[in-house]
Image (cartoon, helix red, strand yellow):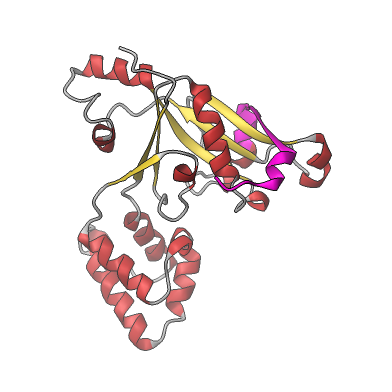
Amino acid sequence: MRSCSVCKEMEIDTGRLEDYKKLAHYHYRDSPEAGLGPFAAIYAIRPNARIKWRADTDTIGVIVYTMPNPNVELRNVATAGVFAGLDRDTQLALVNKNIRRIARVIIEPRFRGIGLAAWLVRATMPLMKVPFVEALAVMGIVNPFFEKGGMQAYTAKIPMRNARLIEALSSVGIEGRCLINPRKVQDRIAQLDKNSGQLIEREIGLFLQSYGKRRSMSAGLNRTRYVLTKLTDRPTYYIWFNPDMELRI
């Protein structure tokens, strides 16, 4: 991971639920009223005494670990079927003994773009004391900090309709990080010239044919928000193999 000079002014510490709550509204999946639910561990990035007054906060970043989902298709690919072919109770016990899941990584916006998310992932995974740590990230391709933090990525096959629309949007300059911001995408669509606008409208129409009543949605922010949600709903699977831990049977 690229060294970060400001990291020398910070430390990673055991976190609390209050640390997560301070930053939860910055996460694209969370709403103010959403609860976190059960968690296995929380760690927080804190400024040291020298920069705390400048940071104006005692929680710069947070990572939340939870118990794993019982069944993840790409887990079987990544682990060569270690957790497959077992009866339900045996599989669940084996998964819970050996895996923890990264459920949230949130960095306070003023401190993004300097490698803190990857640092937080890399530094805390060994603390979980399990053979495997995994994560699912909808926008992993856009912001691959899990890979920078030492995890391996496995991506499910993208449906043709998704690939077509992604390619069309890219052809008019709508790509990358822009795709996580529905309002920005909608503003850019509204500014397209006639030919480009017709191209995108046609591709969105074709894309929505697979979504029942949604196929007749009117153009606008709500439709764009829905389309982007479905466009990125096949998350990338990430896994880290702990070199110091063997599988617990």
Residue 33 can be seen, yes or no: no
Estimate the x, y position of residue 160 in percent, counting from the top left.
21, 61
Residue 220 versus residue 7: which sits nearer the camera? 7
Q: Per the image, is 185 magenta?
A: no
The part of the image, by quadrant, that contains residue 231 is: bottom left
Relative to 206, 128 lies left or right: right
Residue in the image at 50% along x and 49% along y: 28
Residue 11 can be seen, yes or no: yes
Residue in the image at 47% along x and 19% along y: 129
| Placement of 137 over or under 176, stated as above or below | above
Q: Per the image, is 3 magenta?
A: yes
Estimate the x, y position of residue 156 in percent, counting from the top left.
26, 47
Relative to 198, 129 lies left or right: right
Residue in the image at 35% along x and 75% along y: 171
| Placement of 140 over or under 231, stated as above or below | above
The part of the image, by quadrant, that contains residue 71 is: top left
| Quadrant in the picture for the C terminus | top left
Which region shows up in magenta? 1-21
The part of the image, by quadrant, that contains residue 244 is: top left
